[in-house]
Image (cartoon, helix red, strand yellow):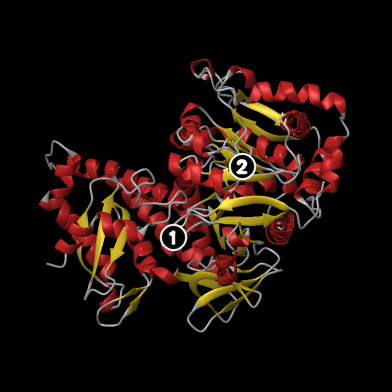
Amino acid sequence: MPFILGKTVSEIYAERVRATPKTVGHRYKPTYPEAGAVGRWKNITFQEFDAEVRLVSFGLRALGARAGDRCVILSNTRFEWTLCDIATVATGAVTVPIYASNTAADCTYILSHSEARFAFVEDARQLEKVLAHRKELPGLEKIIVFETGFLKTHPGHEDVLSLHALKELGRREEARDPGLFEKTLRDARPEDLLTICYTSGTTGQPKGVMLTHDNAVSVLEDCVRIIGKTARPEAEVTVTFLPYSHIIGKLESLAVFTFGWQSVFAENMDLLMSNIAEAHPTLMFAVPRIFEKAHTRIEAMVEQGPALKRDLFRWAMNVGKRAMSEVWAGKKPSPADLVQYRLAEKLVFSKIADRFGGRLRFALCGGAPLPREIGEYFGICGINIMEGYGLTETSAPVALMTPEDVRFGWVGKPLPEVSIRIAEDGEVLVKSRKVFKGYYKNPEATAEAIRDGWFHTGDIGEINADGFLRITDRKKDIIITSAGKNIAPQKIENLARTQKYINQFVVHGDRRNYLVALVTLDRDSLIQWAKDNQVLFSKYEELVRNSKVQSLIQKSIDQLNSGLASYETIKKFMIIPQEFSIETGELTPSLKVKRKFIGQKFERELDSLYS
């Protein structure tokens, strides 16, 4: 069966169910009895999925849902997320995703601003966020909860019901007019609103990005044109773990119906590698952090191994780099290099492939720049990472690398339907069907973002003679030193994260006379290093202050600086014991650095680096 496309997401979904009803589209481990055997993999065919979607959709209708209503989904990525998303679409309503990591105040703002009538929440923790400011949400009528065991402890909340109870309402409602489901799917128009995705901006309140059916379909059409040569209809298996609240996750959830592949839901991030080993994925959607962490772990394992294994690994990487450099340049490796590479594959690279399930052919990577060294590293090991570029406002990718044309450090060429140009100040401008309808209830911001038909991304980039796009920084993140030098911090930060032991790296220096950095380290690797080098400590905070650790990281900084212009070099640094996180405020839900927040939170520490 070929890939399925239509004029709307509703049409794509309905056609997938009709075309391959018996194909398993989703696999997951239920976490509550009503969903099935808890903790055991459950296969759901497209036909079975459709039956559940109908019940949830009719359940919403029984509650009074109408076309255009806003339905919030506040949950981690799981089977119920995509179930309720498609059910919302099948009701003619609009999905409003909220990151599970958002605070109660953030959730209240989005629920209120979007004028949501209904909210799907994952469990007791997410329900508490909604109930924390319930009086501020008079327009919110019903809250539907996936995990149901705790509901007995919430007496008096008549507006809260379980997903199971909603399905029972739907079962009765469906009997009244069963044909209404298909009619609603047919009636959807390309210009209809599909979702409002709130950007997790690094400053200020989030903005609601309005995306239509046509926006999403345009991306899916171009993905078929680009990766359809590599991805096989109904034959691929993915392990899905990215937040579906993020635009890349949203694309992944919809791609299942276009490509007909099988989506396996990871239980959680702690069990991700275990789930990958069980599912044996052939492709993955990922963000650079996944591969950066994998790189750190692999290198640590190599260093901790016996000398013979270390030498074998280094030999394999050198052989691989020599052979793959020829391939990436469009040439053929010499027979001798090819023979050695095959041997390296058998002895070394196959072990790395096994960590990713043994069948991973390629990964689609976005959300942040992928360090060139990381792309090359895994490419040598046989795992092709196809980097892309896009924003929530462009419905995910507008540029994408292909396996046939690899350029590490670049994000690929513009997709077939997309026009990209670089403004005089270096800003990347996009014109496409993929560009959003506007910011919800914010015409001023919309007018600022879309001018003369071009969307102003806020990213700084360049296009080479072959048409490849490279993103060098965010326009607002550019550091201007007191000497007037313009510096792109992301370039330095991406290079720094390839250094051993460095986990996170934030450059500071706007209006200062030199650059400094706040650094967090890979805790497990550093503790192992301390044991190997007889460095005694009682607490981790004590370890990072140790002079030997300071010298260790200084060597990494020196190596980093050797590849930078003098005005880009890091003159001083400070190791922060606690990792930057969403919960502590330094990162957005999409893991972008909040530079202003970090500058304020660590003002004293940063000032001390200039004293």
In this rendering, position of residue 284 left or right of residue 235: left
- Say if 403 sits above or below 514 in the image: above
The residue that mark 1 highlights is 319
Amino acid at the residue labelled 2: Ala
Give the position of the C terminus as an image quadrant. bottom left
Amino acid at the residue labelled 1: Val
Under circle 1, the secondary element is helix
The disc label shown at residue 345, or none: none
- Residue drawn at x 65%, y 50% as measured from the top left: 195
Q: Out of 173 and 412, give the one closest to the viewer.
A: 173
Under circle 2, the secondary element is loop
Residue 64 image position (x, y, % from top left): 73, 33
Q: Out of 191 and 377, give the one closest to the viewer.
A: 191
Sequence-first tag of 1 and 2? 2
Residue 579 image position (x, y, % from top left): 30, 47
Is residue 330 at least partly visible in the picture? no
Quarter of the figure with residue 143 = top right
- Residue drawn at x 45%, y 33% as measured from the top left: 132
Residue 557 image position (x, y, % from top left): 24, 63
Quarter of the figure with residue 578 = top left
- Binning the other alpha carbons within 10 Å of mark 2 as few (below 14), some (14 to 19) or many (20 upward) gives many
In this rendering, position of residue 224 left or right of residue 488: right
Q: Out of 383 and 38, give the one closest to the viewer.
A: 38
The residue that mark 2 highlights is 116
Is residue 569 at least partly visible in the picture? yes
Residue depth check, mark 1 versus mark 2: number of the one nearer the observer? 2
- Binning the other alpha carbons within 10 Å of mark 1 as few (below 14), some (14 to 19) or many (20 upward) gives many
Between the residue at mark 1 and the residue at mark 2, the CA separation in whole angstroms equals 57 Å
Q: Give yes or no for contact between labels 1 and 2 (Cβ–Cβ under 8 Å).
A: no
In this rendering, position of residue 204 left or right of residue 311: right
- Residue drawn at x 58%, y 27% as measured from the top left: 146
